[in-house]
């Protein structure tokens, strides 16, 4: 058997934190391989190398081929891989997280499984959207109503600001081209935002499907988190592009690229991490650095794993 060559697997503490990484990179119609600690991407324009440890999420679109060694590298560096459909508007699968601890996941599950704590987290999510107002005593029905009014007003304001015709949010995932320019821009930008949020959620070891406001979907928590940032990032962008992009241009692609440009400073990913720590009530100083694996015990303690226990150990 031939010995594997190449750089050693990096230690978790050697990798850039998720909030310090580039938000996402989208690739399509390309072959992806590995050279040392970088991805090599081959398409019709040539070959480029991408240092993989700086990427938060790699979005793989149609026509992509990726080698086992490249996926191994992505897994070792904690870079999320998301296989998406044409124009990035469908989600098919994703790779492994950066975190090797279940601290965030356990906290998320604890808060979500109790009605009172779930309501508390949901209220905190709405509070982020209404700075300067106290919404912590409102019911979910009242919160949904206020949020709906806020978003409708925002749509109208942005339509007036950029002189764009607007009736309503209308999105058919099976007919992307059938939408209006602004609806297509919203769809493409929102999916890219979902990818960013998804990468942070799984990097911290949390469950994308365990939502507090949304429920019943495998990305419910992704939608929860993304909704915190649409008013600042995707909605104004979509209306601006609808006023600027011509009919023969691909507004979905332009929206995705422009959102990436607006996130390149890393402020959004850092903000997502901080907001998740706030929502889950986790001390920001509690950085996940090591793997911790134990066996659960119903006596209220944890015991070591990897031990061949006998009845005398009970």
Image (cartoon, rainbow, N blue to C red):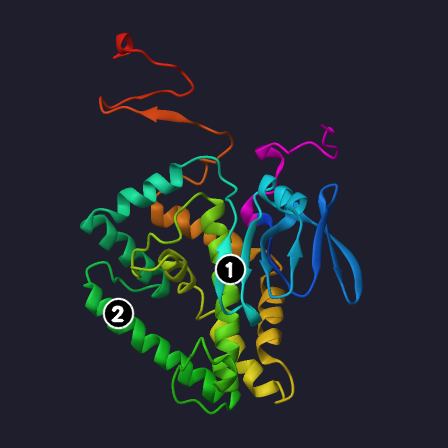
Query: In the figure, is residue 208 to the left or right of 291?
Result: left
Query: In the figure, is residue 309 to the left or right of 161?
Result: left
Does residue 282 appear anywhere in the picture? no
Nearer to me, 275 or 198 = 198
Crowd class of label 2 (few under 14; some 14 to 19; many from 20; radius 10 Å)? some
- Position above or below: 148 against 192: below
> Which of the numbered marks, if any, corresponds to residue 144?
2
Residue 108: x %, y % from top left: 33, 45
Residue 105: x %, y % from top left: 37, 42
Tag nearer the camera, 1 or 2: 1
Nearer to me, 93 or 196 = 93
Crowd class of label 1 (few under 14; some 14 to 19; many from 20; radius 10 Å)? many
Q: Residue at x 50, y 83 (%)?
A: 182
Query: On the image, which quarter does residue 222 sit in?
Result: bottom left
Instruction: Identify the image quadrant of the N terminus.
Output: top right
Per the image, the residue denoted by label 1 is: 195
> Which of the numbered marks, if any, corresponds to residue 48?
none
């Amino acid at each position: 058997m031939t010995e594997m060559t190449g750089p050693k697997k990096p230690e978790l503490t050697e990798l850039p934190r998720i909030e310090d990484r580039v938000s996402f990179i989208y690739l399509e119609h390309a072959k992806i391989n590995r050279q040392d600690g970088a991805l090599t991407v081959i398409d019709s324009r040539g070959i480029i190398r991408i240092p993989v440890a700086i990427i938060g999420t790699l979005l793989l679109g149609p026509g992509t081929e990726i080698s086992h060694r490249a996926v191994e590298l992505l897994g070792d560096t904690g870079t999320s891989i998301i296989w998406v459909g044409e124009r990035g508007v469908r989600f098919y699968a994703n790779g492994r997280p950066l975190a090797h601890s279940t601290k965030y996941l356990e906290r998320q599950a604890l808060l979500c499984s109790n009605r009172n704590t779930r309501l508390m987290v949901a209220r905190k999510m709405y509070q982020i959207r209404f700075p300067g107002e106290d919404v912590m005593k409102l019911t979910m029905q009242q919160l949904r109503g206020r949020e709906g009014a806020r978003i409708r007003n925002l749509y109208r304001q942005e339509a007036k600001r950029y002189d764009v015709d607007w009736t309503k949010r209308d999105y058919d995932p099976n007919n992307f081209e059938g939408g209006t320019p602004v609806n297509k821009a919203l769809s493409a930008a929102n999916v890219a935002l979902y990818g960013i949020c998804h990468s942070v959620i799984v990097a911290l070891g949390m469950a994308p499907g365990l939502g507090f406001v949304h429920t019943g979907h495998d990305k419910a928590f992704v939608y929860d988190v993304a909704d915190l940032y649409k008013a600042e990032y995707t909605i104004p962008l979509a209306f601006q592009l609808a006023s600027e992009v011509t009919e023969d241009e691909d507004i979905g692609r332009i929206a995705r690229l422009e959102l990436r440009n607006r996130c390149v400073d890393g402020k959004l990913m850092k903000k997502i991490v901080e907001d998740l720590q706030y929502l889950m009530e986790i001390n920001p100083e509690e950085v996940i650095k090591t793997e911790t694996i134990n066996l659960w015990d119903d006596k209220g303690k944890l015991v070591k794993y990897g031990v061949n226990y006998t009845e005398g150990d009970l």
